Image: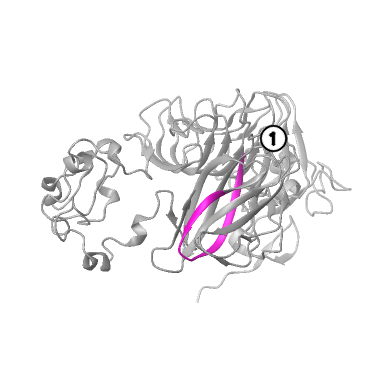
Amino acid sequence: MNRTALFAKKTPGGVLAIEDMARGTGDRWFVDSGATYASDATGYGMSPDKPFATLDYAIGQATANNGDIIYVMPGHAESYGSGEGFTADVAGLTVVCLGEGADRPTFTFAATDATCAVTAASFKMTGFLFVVSIDSVVTYATITGADCVLEGEIRDTTDKEVVDGFTVSGDRFKARIVHRGYTSGDANDSTIALDGVDGADIYVEAYGKAGVGVVDMRSHASANVVVDGIFLVTSTTDFSKTVVDTITGSTYKATGFDIGAGKRFSGNGTTAKHSIDDFTVATLGAGAITAAVIATGAVDADAIADNAIDAGALAADCITAAKIADDAITSDQLADDAITAAKLGADAITNAKIADDSLASEQFAASAAEKTNDGTVITRATAALPQTTAAAIFTITGLCLVKRIIGYVTTVVGNVPNATKLKNNPSGTGATTDLCATLDIDNAAVGSYFQVTGTFANAMVKTVDIPIPKVQAAEFVVVPGTIELDCAGSDGGGGRIRWSVTYVPLESGAQIVAA
């Protein structure tokens, strides 16, 4: 059995203290601008009660490649003027920003040329919040060191944006970034700009207006770049400003969910970004799937226009002549956008073939459905609120167990009293049932989330945290009919909310789809 050593030196010159040595055995430093005794001086920084006042000074006290960790305490705040910002020039150093929500250490950039520099290798910083107080800040940080890791949030405000969140040229870069941008802005170009990077693993949640692309490869081609995330780029629904190879010639893989398009997408250095939710006649070239193509035992990428379904997406031999009767599906039969039992060859799809999971009912879920360990997730495209009335947001067929309902505000709700709740309106006998008590969503900001607890007497819950805590403690069953959003007020149709529901069908054919 593996055992983890637990004793490590925590403060310079200090005694051994209990700590998981997986985090390293180096020195431990503390930074807290709000502490009663805080100073950038000798004798400070060795405990939370007597910390350093600034991160830059603390970095200068650390030892390279020693496993040192700097803890930045909750509520710490720094503001950078012209030419100011910390310099991470100590290799192998980890900076951990402690606190949640508004208590996170906050670094404010108050001049367009205020910026940080990460020049050392293997630098890691987590939990930070970078904000701007002036428009067109050039970049929060330039990362030239290799093997660096960033995990945190950057945030724009009204008419104040960063041009490029981070500018990276160091190889093997890793990042997990939330970018809360300004949806009506004109200064931001990208969240992360890559310049000749060899190896990058990026997850980004970006909401705002990107002038070039959320992740942009520029100046020099980058290689071995993997990007995933959730994207909401103002007025863009064609994936064109999610991941961009401005310089061209870069090798990358890009996947994610585009909220504006309401679809997942995929692409790489040689294939244009395209929806992976769509499989319609429009996405297939004429004669793309014929009996002759199927008879070879495979459907290859060349047979389908725009790589809508490539060979890698199909399990080996998953569609063969044996599974489909002779001439069962031809281009002529696809032309009128319908495949009926009459157009499929005799006995082409039988119960026996469905029974062996070759065509499972789950495979025919609505295009927006996605399987998770918790159940099936259905997302409804962002839409205006009902105005002093109730309106269906999901349609229910059969009995379904609801594990989570969550609404995300994509456009601020109007500033009017608006008592709001969710209801299950049955299509058969029985009365409409409230799934929660009302919550006033007056002036709910972009990035707000709404959930129910599962106890119908409890009000709907509003959160703004990233990651989003799950508040539904009790699961419940909804009956055939609709899930409705009931708004007592009218904000004039300006507010927008995107709803998702995670459910498990409780009987054959049961499902929930977007209304």
Would you say residue 398 sits in the magenta stretch?
yes
Q: With 284 as the anchor, is 11 left or right in this view?
A: right
**Residue at 69% from the left image edge and 35% from the top image edge:** 131
**Badge 1: residue crowd in 10 Å (few <14, some 14–19, many ≥20):** many
Nearer to me, 51 or 451: 451
Q: With 10 as the anchor, is 476 left or right in this view?
A: left
Q: With 366 as the anchor, is 130 left or right in this view?
A: right
**Residue occupying the far front of the picture:** 429
Q: With 295 as the anchor, is 306 left or right in this view?
A: right
Q: Position of residue 19 (x, y in %)?
A: 67, 65
Query: What residue is disc 1 on?
Result: 131
**Residue at 61% from the left image edge and 50% from the top image edge:** 485
User: Which stretch is magenta?
Assistant: 392-410
Q: Secondary structure under badge 1?
A: strand
Nearer to me, 275 or 193: 275
Q: Is residue 401 visible?
A: yes
